[in-house]
Amino acid sequence: MLDNLESNYNCANAGEDLHQLKQELASMRGMGQSDPETQEQINRLENQIAFIMNKCDINH
């Protein structure tokens, strides 16, 4: 999970960052746990992915 995403995020890193975030998200979902802490981490990963895709105009 990326520590800090801001409006000045460098889209040159988007490919690698999205790959890493999506792997982390798949891993978290694969754990099958739905406790509040895990769900919070899943939500944060989804938000980070959405932020990068919107900021860098990536449509997938």
Image (spheres, grey):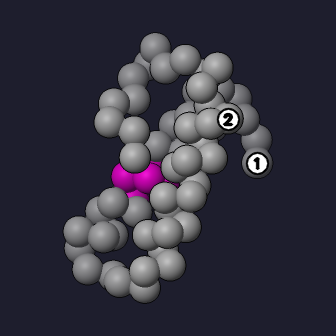
Question: Residue 15: which disc?
Answer: 2
Instruction: Name the residue rendered at 76%, 41% in the picture.
Output: 59
| Label 2 Cα neighbours within 10 Å, binned few <14 / some 14-19 / many ≥20 | few
Amino acid residing under circle 1: His
Say if the magenta span includes residue 44. yes
Residue 24: image location, x then y, percent: 49, 58
Q: Overall secondary structure of the magenta stretch? A: helix
Could you tell me which secondary element the residue under label 1 belongs to? loop
Which of the two residues, 20 or 8, is positioned nearer the viewer here? 20
Displayed quadrant of residue 5: top left
Q: Is residue 36 left or right of residue 59?
A: left
Instruction: Name the residue rendered at 55%, 67% in the picture.
Output: 26
In three-dimensional space, the C-alpha distance between marks 1 and 2, rounded to whole angstroms, equals 12 Å
Residue extending furthest toward the bottom? 32
Q: Which residues are magenta?
A: 43-47
* In the image, residue 24 above or below residue 2: below
Along the polypeptide, which appears first: circle 1 or circle 2? 2
Amino acid residing under circle 2: Gly
Could you tell me which secondary element the residue under label 2 belongs to? helix
Residue extending furthest toward the top? 8
Instruction: Name the residue rendered at 30%, 62% in the picture.
Output: 40
Residue 28: image location, x then y, percent: 44, 69
| Label 1 Cα neighbours within 10 Å, binned few <14 / some 14-19 / many ≥20 | few
Front label number (1 vs 2): 2
Question: Residue 60: which disc?
Answer: 1
Displayed quadrant of residue 16: top right
Residue 43: image location, x then y, percent: 39, 59
Residue 1: image location, x then y, percent: 40, 46
* In the image, residue 1 above or below residue 41: above
